[in-house]
Amino acid sequence: MKSALHNMNPSVKFLIITICMFTLAFFFNPWTPLIVWIGVLLVQLLFSRINWKVWTLFMIPFVIMAFGYFWTTLVFAEEKTGPVVWTILNMEIREVLLNHALALSFRVLAFSGLSLLFALTTKPVSFILSLMQQMKLSPKIAYSILVGYQFLPVLKDEFVQIQQAHRLRGATQKGNIITRLLNMRKILLPMLAGAVRKSERAAFAMEARGFTGEKRTSFYHIIGIGKLDVYMAALFLMLLIVSCASSSFI
Amino acid sequence: MSDVIQFIDVSFRFPDEEKVILDHLSFSVKAGEKVVITGPSGSGKTTLLYLCNRLYPENCDGVMNGSLKLFDKESSKYAPGEVNHKIATVFQDPDAQFCMMTVEEELAFTLENLNIPREEMDGKIAAVLELTGLTDFRNAVIQQLSGGEKQRIATACALIMEPEVLLLDEPISHLDPYTGKKFISWLDELQQERALTVVAIEHRLDLWDGFFDREIVLESTNRVNELMTRESSIQGSQSLYVEAVHNDSFLKPVSFHLQKGEVAVLAGPNGSGKSTLLKALCQLIPAKGTVTPDRLGYVPQSPEFLFITKSVRDEIAFGGGTEVETLLERLYLQNVAEAHPFAVSHGQKRRVAIGAMLADGREIILMDEPTSGQDAASLSELYELIDERARQGTTFLIVTHDMEFASAIADSVLLMDEGQLTGKFNAESVWASEDLLTAHHLLKPKGGTPREVCFA
């Protein structure tokens, strides 16, 4: 049960999350996104083994952004009519405005919550494999991404080695962030040169293994769709319906 | 016996170049033969191999004349990837020939490409792993394996296609001699079991010991002389003191001394901590212990990692040294002084790197694997560079797997195993001691021309 979200078919998960986001865009009230956000949290609590520390770290910038939306909507509003619900620092907050502000910030939270749910419970490799098997993504693109993914650790090693070599030559990174960023290109240039060579070799290696880029008839790792996907999709749709319906009741 | 590969009067050049790489070449390889292609770099060895598995001319828009038949059919009549399951290839670089994370996935990728039904995949994977003795590696993550293991897995991936021809592109150039030797005897058994046709590129045949039936020499002009054992250039005074250098994780305390003008080789099995020691000595990674002097020069395997400016002259002048012109002249770099350091040849890049270190007042040069993937001509260039600099008083510490090169150049040999320095030895005594060599996965060099003959 704790692994239901992780075991879900990635394409189905992707589709359902996209539907949720698309639907949310049509509802502009505080309750719909709030219910979705809380629902997403509950689903993750019940059906996933995600690392909540990582989740919190990723969530921090979105919370700041949400608060930013909330505050700027209140402070820079033109609206001067309607009942006053709250007075703070000589500022009169009107009901319509408060609703707008909350709707905006909860929307940020709901969108980021949905995205994080997908990102933290999906393995990149199975996502690509599933896109190829269920969504008819061309093997040419799918395998290019997979091969690129294998190169990440190699590139990281190279980055460290070049940094070390530059430090030896006394070309240490001094100054503010901007000069440091500009100096990065000196590290990136040799990496780029190396990457071009590597990618050519990788392409040759793929062709030498008989890779033609054509649709394949069989897969070793089958990423299937099962009952679990139906249940989880139903759960998400229910959450979506409840949250959308709430806008007309509350 | 039928011809599996047949070149009839084949010429080849790259689209942007006037120079013809292969010039009216004719030869054929019969089924079951073991053929090696040799020649200096730039003679078209790799091009020839890529023509045999049909990666060229299509993928580089090269211009090919003449007739190239694979299994009695014109190579241009095959679709891309079609012939590759009959002619399988193992490439040179163990790091750049895998597409997937684990061994099992990599093998499955190959089978998927051939549209093998899923039910048969498991059996085929198990069978090829059994055949190649790699069953334990089935779920291993490829990037975490050693170079030797990766090369064996690349071979397994080639064999799972049940090919008739196996092409090898310098398969042992990244392996230590002992691992390389093991790879060769393993390949020999496989070849006999499967009656494979083997075509390999190799510029150093000393480890292969009569494996091949026939040698095809490309562009046999000016064969480089064998490296001669150099005369020692030790100049008496001590130049490098290393006392108890170690780090918290892997490196055990290491102490040794080197003299001015001494050329020392640091050798040991893959993963014994040689590169780690070099980095610890020049303080690239945190380490405890003392190194005098504290400024050492370091040339990584890819010298371009060091470059930060836009011309060779600026590169050497970067540290603020005053002898830039003298150094340019002494390292034969005047002609390319204004060129971008990335645009010069590999040998020149290495000269630039050494020049930059010397201009910085770093009189002791540590080199990480300068010999790997180099052909005879560039090895002899490297040899001369080191010899010349050592005579001027530079001290060298060189990590290499190439024992022929080591025996030609080294005054002394430092041996390492599992993060520990076994000791510093006189070069001659290491080559004489079977025990030391075996314990460090090294092979006795055949030896260059002895010193006496050099002076004759």
Image: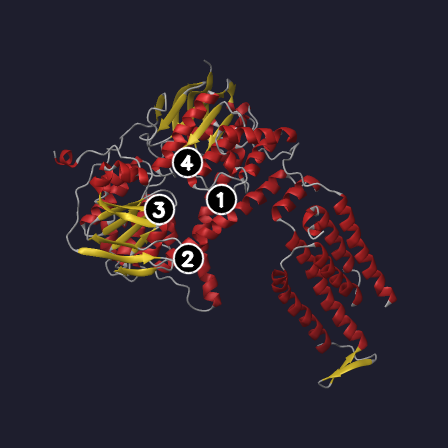
Q: Disc 3 marks which amino acid? A: Val
Q: Which residue is mark 1?
A: B143
Residue B431: x, y in percent? 24, 37
Q: CA distance from mark 1 to mark 4?
A: 36 Å
Query: How many C-alpha atoms fall within 10 Å of the one at disc 1: few (<14), some, or many (≥20)?
Result: some
Q: Disc 1 marks which amino acid? A: Gln
- First-in-chain label (1 vs 4): 4
SS at circle 1: helix
Q: Given this view, does label 1 or label 4 mark the residue nearer the observer?
A: 1
Rendering colour mode: secondary structure
Say whether marks 2 and 4 touch (CB < 8 Å): no
The residue nearer to you, when weighing A190 against A242, is A242
Query: How many C-alpha atoms fall within 10 Å of the one at disc 2: few (<14), some, or many (≥20)?
Result: many
Do badges 2 and 4 share one subunit? no
- First-in-chain label (3 vs 4): 4
Q: Chain of mark 2?
A: A
Residue B442: x, y in percent? 31, 38
Q: Chain of mark 1?
A: B
Q: Which residue is mark 3?
A: B344
Extreme-left residue of the structure: B456
- First-in-chain label (1 vs 3): 1
Q: Residue at x 47, y 24 (%)?
A: B165
SS at circle 4: loop
The residue nearer to you, when weighing B371 against A104, is B371
Mark number displayed over residue A163: 2
Do badges 2 and 3 share one subunit? no
Q: Which residue is mark 4?
A: B17
Up-down relation of residue A227 to residue A46 (above or below): above
Query: How many C-alpha atoms fall within 10 Å of the one at disc 4: few (<14), some, or many (≥20)?
Result: few
Determine the image quadrant of residue B110.
top right
